[in-house]
Image: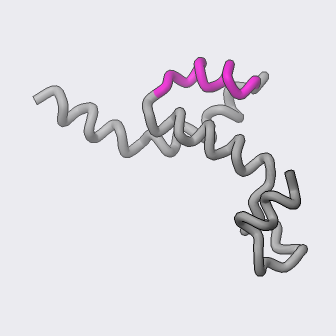
Amino acid sequence: MRPIYNEMFNEGLEDDDAQNRVVNHTLRHTFASHLAINQVPLFEIQKLMNHKDINMTLRYMKLAEANKVSAVEGIY
C-alpha cells in the first residue's frame, strides 16, 4: 500500500516526515474518528477497533464533544 499512499497523498513529503505522511494507521484513525463524530456508542467503537483498553477508545471520543451541544439544542 505504501506506493499507493505515496502517489496519492505523500508526494513531495520528506521520507522522515512522519507527522504528515499517510499510512495504514491514518485510515484506521479516520475510521474511528468518523464513528465518534457520528455518535456511535463508545463500546461499539471499542469493538470495531478491537481495543482491549477502553482508554484507547476514549481518545477518539473527544471528537464527539461538539455533538453534545447539538444534542441538547435538539431537545428544545
Question: Magenta stretch mostly in which secondary structure?
Answer: helix
Q: What is the x, y in percent for residue 18?
A: 82, 67
In-front residue for pair 21/73? 21
In the image, what residue occupies the spot 77% across and 47% down?
25
In-front residue for pair 69/13? 13
Q: What is the x, y in percent for residue 65?
A: 42, 42
Q: What is the x, y in percent for residue 40?
A: 49, 25
Q: Quadrant of the C terminus?
A: top left
In-front residue for pair 72/14? 14
Q: Which residues are magenta?
A: 40-50
Up-down relation of residue 15 to residue 29 (above or below): below
Left or right relative to 76: residue 40: right
Up-down relation of residue 12 to residue 38 (above or below): below
Res. 69 image quadrant: top left
Left or right relative to 7: residue 36: left
Q: What is the x, y in percent for residue 19?
A: 75, 67
In the image, what residue occupies the spot 87% across and 60% down?
3
